[in-house]
Image: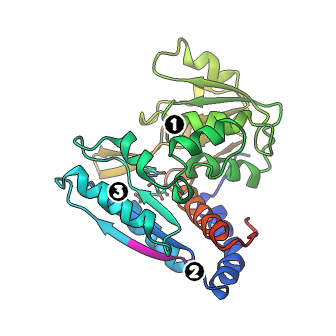
């Protein structure tokens, strides 16, 4: 029987597990607060940002919602970030990706105060992660670790294959998997568009994490019996019946081989949002000097 790892359920557990810490912080005068900056008019990004606000509202995290027209000069975005950096009531800042072409994404990430960088994308935070001293684990890979733990998947000693080498998912995911921590100690291979014989690599894996951004590219015949399959892809594709969300895994054929698999939607996506709340509560705890209990 293949286990379907329910991301909505695990994310709800994470949100519930944050409630006491949020209450403690709020009672001590530090209500955790997340500021989001949206500078694109992609409907998917708008959906993600509004879901993040709804999640915050559900658990008692305050929010600031900043929307900039995609044509806004980059300087205005930097001024906005400077203001949020200086605002003592804001603990976490998230600039929704992607950004318009005229804005240098790296410069934007560098301009966020690393202590408020709840995405974990600032070079200082990337460096800390790689060095095994993470301040904030990036939300999607951290969410994947929580999903694996919820499904009792042992990473220690496992052969893990990460398909994709993005800065948001592939690279930090591989880094977390090789750390000497819980959810790490895996023998990890990173595959990408130049990998020779991808199927050979995925067939040798105990855990496959698909994060290539290519709809349904990992099929059942690329997997061995009993593989754990985590699908990070979120691709909107047009079908005869209209548009549909699919992952980077061909769910039906992969499910035939997998011992456990995440669906899309309802797998990794909700966890990305839950771990953002986690990082925001951590950020507020650090500011308040209160050691919060994190689930
Ligand atoms: N600053 C950031 N930008 C982006 C990130 C990020 O981590 N930080 N990741 C992705 C998108 N993303 C977060 O913003 C994200 C994607 C999907 C979901 C989600 O909940 N998906 C649902 C389905 C939602 C739907 O119906 O469309 C699911 O999978 O069940 C949340 C966050 C790019 N940008």
The relative height of residue 273 versus residue 217 in the rendered view (above or below) is below
Q: Which numbered mark, 3 or 2, is in the foreground of this view?
A: 2
> Which residue is the site of mark 1?
211
Query: Left or right: where does residue 209 sit relative to residue 236?
Result: right
> Which residue is the site of mark 2?
31
- Residue 129 found in image quarter: top right
The relative height of residue 157 versus residue 20 in the rendered view (above or below) is above
Residue 50 in view here: yes
Badge 1, how many Cα within 10 Å: few under 14, some, many 20+? many
> Which residue is the site of mark 3?
45
* Alpha carbon distance from label 2 to label 1: 34 Å
From this viewpoint, which residue is outermost toward the left? 71
**Which quadrant contains ligand 1?**
bottom left
Query: Left or right: where does residue 152 sit relative to residue 243?
Result: right
Q: Secondary structure at mark 1?
A: loop
Residue 65: x and y in percent read 36, 71
Residue ID at (42%, 36%): 215
Highlighted range, magenta: 59-64
Whether the residues at callouts 2 and 1 have beta carbons within 8 Å, the answer is no
Badge 3, how many Cα within 10 Å: few under 14, some, many 20+? some
From this viewpoint, which residue is outermost toward the bottom? 27
Q: Secondary structure at mark 3?
A: helix
Residue 25: x and y in percent read 66, 80
Residue ID at (54%, 57%): 118
Residue 7: x and y in percent read 61, 58
Q: Is mark 3 within 8 Å of ligand 1?
A: yes
């Amino acid at each position: 029987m293949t286990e379907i790892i329910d991301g909505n359920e695990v994310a709800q557990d994470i949100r519930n597990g944050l409630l006491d810490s949020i209450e403690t912080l709020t009672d001590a005068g530090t209500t955790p607060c997340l500021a989001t900056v949206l500078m694109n008019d992609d409907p998917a990004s708008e959906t993600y940002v509004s879901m993040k606000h709804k999640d915050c509202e559900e658990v008692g995290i305050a929010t600031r919602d900043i929307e900039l027209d995609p044509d806004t000069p980059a300087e205005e975005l930097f001024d906005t970030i400077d203001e949020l950096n200086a605002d003592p009531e804001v603990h976490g800042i998230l600039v929704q990706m992607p950004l318009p072409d005229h804005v240098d994404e790296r410069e934007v990430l560098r301009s966020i105060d690393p202590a408020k960088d709840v995405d974990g994308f600032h070079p200082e935070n990337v460096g800390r992660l790689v060095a095994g001293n993470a301040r904030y684990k990036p939300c999607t890979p951290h969410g994947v670790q929580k999903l694996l733990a919820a499904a009792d998947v042992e990473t220690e000693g496992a052969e893990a294959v990460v398909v994709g080498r993005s800065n948001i998912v592939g690279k930090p995911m591989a880094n977390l998997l090789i750390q000497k921590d819980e959810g790490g100690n895996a023998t990890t291979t990173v595959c990408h568009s130049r990998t020779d014989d991808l199927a050979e690599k995925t067939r040798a894996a105990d855990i496959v994490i698909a994060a290539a951004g290519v709809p349904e590219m990992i099929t059942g015949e690329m997997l061995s019996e009993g593989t754990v399959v985590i699908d990070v892809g979120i691709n909107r594709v047009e079908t005869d019946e209209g548009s549909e969300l699919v992952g980077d895994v061909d769910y039906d054929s992969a499910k035939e081989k997998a011992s456990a698999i995440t669906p899309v939607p309802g797998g990794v996506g909700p966890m990305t949002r839950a771990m953002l709340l986690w990082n925001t509560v951590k950020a507020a705890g650090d500011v308040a000097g209160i050691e919060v209990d994190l689930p």
